[in-house]
Image: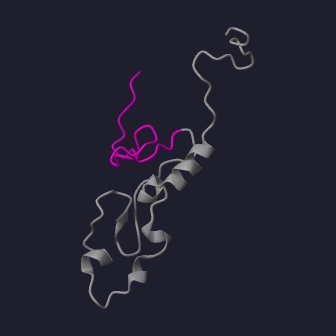
């Protein structure tokens, strides 16, 4: 039985393939979120970083930089901030520990073998 391809799929195996150094959320319990449109009509989280309605595209000396502050400008899972060492560390601490290949879950089979 084959799986149907979902063109609206947010991620590939809980990763962000369009960001070359983006961390994987796989095994962290964090689900990838789709892009959203904020109150300015700017799509956040699509990696195009350009929108005709964005204050960045319509900047002038009258524009208050604070207009682009707040959570409506930050995507929860597709943000460059996840590439920082601190945020990668947060993700690593949420992953379940992985056993080494060929390890027995309760017996140390290598004990006394060296």
Q: Quadrant of residue 11?
A: top left
Q: Nearer the viewer, residue 4 or 20?
A: 20
Q: Main secondary structure of the magenta part?
A: loop
Q: Nearer the viewer, residue 39 or 22?
A: 22
| Residue at screen point 47% across, 55% down | 84
Q: Which segment is the magenta one? A: 1-26
Query: Is 18 part of what is drawn in magenta?
Result: yes
Q: Is residue 68 left or right of residue 89?
A: left
Q: Nearer the viewer, residue 91 or 50?
A: 91
Q: Quadrant of the C terminus?
A: top right
Q: Quadrant of residue 34?
A: bottom left
Q: Whole-percent x and y of residue 109?
A: 70, 11
| Residue at screen point 35% across, 35% down | 5
Q: Whole-percent x and y of residue 70?
A: 48, 74
Q: Whole-percent x and y of residue 12?
A: 40, 39
| Residue at screen point 37% across, 32% down | 4
| Residue at screen point 41% across, 21% down | 1
Query: Is 70 part of what is drawn in magenta?
Result: no
Q: Quadrant of residue 46?
A: bottom left
Q: Residue furthest front?
A: 114
């Amino acid at each position: 039985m084959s799986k149907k391809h979902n063109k609206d799929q947010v991620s590939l195996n809980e990763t962000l393939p369009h960001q070359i150094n983006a961390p994987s959320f796989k095994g962290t319990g964090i689900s990838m979120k789709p892009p959203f449109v904020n109150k300015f009509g700017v799509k956040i989280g699509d990696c195009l970083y350009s929108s005709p309605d964005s204050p960045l595209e319509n900047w002038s000396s009258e524009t208050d930089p604070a207009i682009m502050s707040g959570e409506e400008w930050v995507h929860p899972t597709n943000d460059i901030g996840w590439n920082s060492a601190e945020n990668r560390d947060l993700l690593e601490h949420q992953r379940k520990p992985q056993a080494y290949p060929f390890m027995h879950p309760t017996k140390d089979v290598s004990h006394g073998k060296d």
